[in-house]
Structures are given as structure tokens and as C-alpha cells.
Amino acid sequence: MTETPEKSPAVYRLLPKLADYQQLTPNSWDLRQLKRWQRLGAEEDRPVQFRAEWAGERNWPKGDFPSGYPGAPILSRRLIDRFGVDALRTAGPLLPVDIEGAQGDEYHLLLVEQVVDCLDLRRSSKPKKLNGEVKNAVYRTDALPAHLPAFRLPQFAGAVQWNGWAAERLVELTDDQVEARLCWSENPTAVPHPDPWGF
């Protein structure tokens, strides 16, 4: 699949919609290791495995984008194949997810390696001291990696930012299972989500 970046760049936070779909709850140790690697970048902290378990009613279908944690996007094999594995891998490798008690389920964590310094610090809100969260972000279009589906910011390394073209495609491919919260758009008429990183 070949995508071209949109004429009016935009950045989103993606999470599963609150609907009758099962979601994956990451293993707390693996999630801590992922956060440490994202924050510090030490090679010894780089995840080599990622474990999770299903949450929700057993009779509910399993979602194609079942993780709400902003730094741990998990995609089904079906969604990966439809989006394009090569396009996703431009952001980082796909790490198989070991799902407790569900050997037949094939899901992967997109381990986003691409950290891009493209935030306009003068025009954005100040990053929070605790985790670097930027509630009101403004991006520098000259530095925005529009060719990547996703990237991370050095100021807010624990959160995956999705370029508009990739976010729109994932929403379309999952039949609206994904909530795309607008963080920023170059289009002055677009209204960003009031709390894109909240729950």
C-alpha cells in the first residue's frame, strides 16, 4: 500500500472506541519496561516480548485495535495486512503479543522507534513534568514526518502520535472501531480534541 500525506497535515491520538469489543490489557511488567525504554532509550530496556490478556465480555468480538494505552498500539494481523506491513514498519518493528489463554489470536505491538523533534515549543502548551504530556500541541510542518504512519516526540516519548492519513485509514479499515482524537491540524478550521490524552 502506498499512501501520500494529506495536503493539510494533522496529528491524532488513536484509541479503541468504548464499544462492545474485547480489549487487551498489557502485562504490567512489560508495560513498565516499554515505558522505561521509551523514556530513556536504553538498549537493555528495549522490549523483546509483550504479553497481554483479554478484558471484556467473552461473547464480545475481539477488536482489531484493542489497546488504549497511548504508547502501546496493538493491531490484529488482519488489520496489519490490510494497512500494509511495510508501511507500518517505517515507524518501527511489529512485536508479537503473547495473549494469555489465546494461542490462536495473532496480534502485534507496533514498537514505534521514530522519535522526531517537530513540536513548536513556543506555541504549544508546556509539557507536564510527570510524563511530558502536551495537551495543546502545535507542530512545525517543516519537521513533521508526514511520510511515517506514526512517531513519538522527545518531549512526550511515552505516547504514539499518528499522522492524519494513517489515522483515517485505520478508522476506515476497522469499520469505526477506532477513536481518532485530533491533537493538531494545519487547517485553521479544524478543532482539536479538548483532552486528547485523557480517558
Image (cartoon, grey):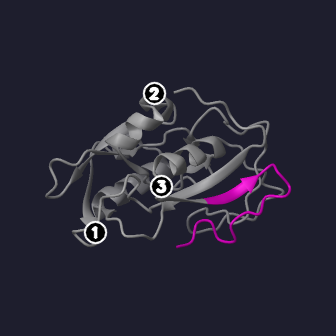
Of labels 2 and 1, earlier in sequence is 1
The residue drawn where x is 58% and y is 48% is: 167
Cα distance, mark 3 to mark 2? 20 Å
Q: Is residue 84 above or below residue 66?
A: above
Label 2 to label 1: alpha-carbon separation: 30 Å
User: Seen from this angle, which residue lies furthest right?
Assistant: 188
Where does the image place residue 199, in percent across and percent down from the top left?
Answer: 52, 73
Are circles 3 and 1 on residues that touch, CB within 8 Å? no
Q: Which of disc 2 and disc 3 is earlier in sequence?
A: 3
Q: Nearer the viewer, residue 111 or 187?
A: 187
Find disc 2 in the rendering and name its residue: 86
Residue 152 seen from this side? no
**Residue 55, numbered circle:** 1
Question: Horizontally, is 162 left or right of 59 in the view?
Answer: right
Q: Which residues are magenta?
A: 181-199
Question: Which residue matches tag 3?
Answer: 71
Q: What type is the residue that disc 2 sits on?
A: Asp
